[in-house]
Every structure is written in structure tokens, then in C-alpha cells.
Amino acid sequence: MEKISVIVPCYNEQEVLNLYYKEMNSIMEQMKEVEFELIFVDDGSTDETLSTLRELFEKDNRCHYYSFSRNFGKEAALYAGMKEAQGDYVVVMDADLQDPPSYIPKMYEEVKDGRYDCAATRRMDRKGEKKIRSFFSAAFYKVINKMSKTQIVEGARDFRMMNRKMVDALLEMGEYNRFSKGMFGWIGFRTKWMEYHNIERAAGETKWSFMKLVKYSVDGILGFSTLPLSLASYSGFLFCGFSFCMICYLVIKNMIWHDPVAGWPSMMCVIFFIGGVQLLCMGILGQYLARTYVEVKDRPIFILKETSDSKKRRAWKEESSPALL
Ligand code: UDP
Ligand code: MG
């Protein structure tokens, strides 16, 4: 019997978890031909998420949970889940029911005979979203696809089912700065795209502010393109050429017409402009250096604080079942 592991990152999702389990349970009842395991990753929630997960574990032995010592981010939660997943197929989905469990049987149909390695959802329209957000999002995909060799599919969601080969490939990418959208594209494989229309969250609220999204976009660009670095050197070349021409022009002008160089304001403009470009280039270098620094430190991507996994509990000398905590 084949097994499907479902990874659910949860950060302050107490309102939706039981609802999610109910929906998921009816899908598991429907798909009797496969075995399921639900891997909930509590990403350092500050509400009752963890105790809800303990209750689910008690109720249903297909539910497992891993709880982080603090908030490490969704990407870290996905990595932790994939590391623990035992299934032949792995589904990644949000807890808030924006990723409807009803897609899972359809996804399984696409991947089970090996025609595709992955069945993923993709947003075809941006209804129900602020215009300005859609604009920035479209601009982001345009920029990143111009700058990076890795194809990043516009509107692709993380919600997908992958086979073991693909999950193992993702696990091989042990980088600290994780940008899933890029990683899914980078590893390749055949993906079946399924149309998805946006659904509002069942309860709770989104953890993404506009600034967080901007930071996420910058992470994506820096993680999957080194073009900004070359831009610094190109602009260096350009300015060298330009200043050489300027020097020749000024020298010749002075020798022939004995015309003293005038113009303090224009000089200041040039100094500020060049200074700005230099700082920008240094900033770009700094961004890459900072990321290299973090990668070189090779710190763990996440740290566990509590889990339902009995092997880990034994290693921690936590003999009792979490249900008794
Ligand atoms: N999430 C997480 N860690 C975080 C932020 C979010 O594990 O630091 C989880 C969250 O619980 C949810 C999923 O990632 O299951 C997507 O988050 P959210 O619904 O806030 O994002 P949106 O759907 O608005 O893009
Ligand atoms: Mg959501």
C-alpha cells in the first residue's frame, strides 16, 4: 500500500486546526487505497496550537507533530516536515484551508502512475486581491525570471504533491536561506499544473505583511540570481569609460581654448551620483556577503523543542507519551 505524507506548517493556527483535521479526515476516509500520515510542524506558535496538536496526536495515530523552539519561518517548517516524512508521496499544504484537501485525490491521480513527478497548484487569476499587490507580484515574477536562469512559475503555490525522488532532491538542498518557489523550479522534474482560484482563509489571519513580502522577494532574487553582482561590475566599467571620455574632453578643451573648468554645482551632482552608485554596489555586495556568512556558519535550519516522535523522545529521555504532559 502506498503512503502519502501531508506536511502542514502551523504558526498560530489554533482556530483552524480542528477544522482542517475534519476536512482532511473526510478525504482520508475517501482514499482508502492509500495510507496517510499527517505531519504538523508547529513553527514556534504562541497560542494554543501545540496543545491542539497534542490532542490530535492522542485522537488519531496518523497525526504526528514536531514543534520548534521558536519561530523559524514556513520554509524551515517545510524542510523539517520533509525530513521526517516517510511516505512515497509528500503533500505540502497550509493549515488555513486555503489549500483545499479535495485536491489531494486529483493530485494523486496525476502522480501515481509516474507520468508526473509533481502535481502542483497555480493561481490563474488574482481576484479578491488588492490591485497594488497584484501589480507588485506580477512585477516580481517578471524581474526574477529575467534575472535568474531558474524558471519561477507565476502564481505557483506551495500546495503540491511530490514523489519521493523530488522530495529527496529538495532535502539535498540543505541551504539556510530557503526560497521554495525557486527550489521547486531549480530541481526540475515534470510538474502537472492544476488551476487554483484563491480562497479566503477559514479562520485566523495571514502572517504576511507587505514588508515581509518585499523581503521575501529580495531573498528570492538574491538566492537564485547573481546578476545584481555583475550589475555592479558593469556599471563600474561604464563609469570608467565615461570618466575617461570626460577627462579627455576637459584636457583638450583647456589646452585649445584655455577654458578653465567651471561649474561647482555640476561637480557636486557628479560626486553625489557616483557616491550613490558606489554605495549601492557595496550594498549589493554586502547583501550577498551577509547571506554567504549565514550559510558558512552552517547553523541548523530549525531546532525541535517537542515532538510526538517516540524515537526522538527516547533520545531526549522523555519516556512518557506527550499525551501525559
Ligand atoms: N506559517 C509558518 N510560519 C510562519 C508563517 C506562516 O509555519 O512564520 C504557516 C502558516 O501557519 C500557514 C502557512 O504557513 O499554514 C501559510 O501562512 P499564511 O496563511 O499566513 O500565508 P498566506 O496564505 O496568507 O500566504
Ligand atoms: Mg494562508
Image: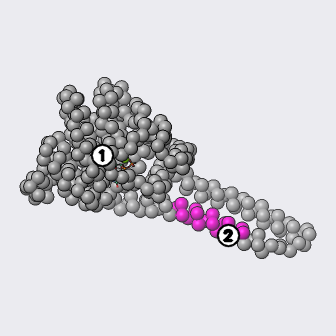
For marks 2 and 1 on the same chain, the one whose residue lies earlier in the sequence: 1
Which numbered disc covers residue 272?
Answer: 2
Which kind of residue does numbered mark 2 sit on?
A: Phe
Q: Around disc 2, counting alpha carbons within 10 Å, would you say few (fewer than 14), some (14 to 19), or many (20 or more)? A: few
Callout 1: CB less than 8 Å from ligand 1: yes
The answer to whether residue 276 shows anywhere in this view is: yes
Please name the residue shown 59% across and 58% down the image: 232
Query: Where does residue 235 sit, x and y in percent of width and height?
Result: 64, 57
Marks 2 and 1 close (CB-CB < 8 Å): no
97 or 219, nearer to the observer: 97
The answer to whether residue 153 shows anywhere in this view is: no
Is 90 included in the stretch rendered in magenta?
A: no
Q: Quadrant of residue 279?
A: bottom right
Q: What's the magenta region?
A: 269-285
CA gap between label 2 and label 1 equals 50 Å
Which kind of residue does numbered mark 1 sit on?
A: Ala
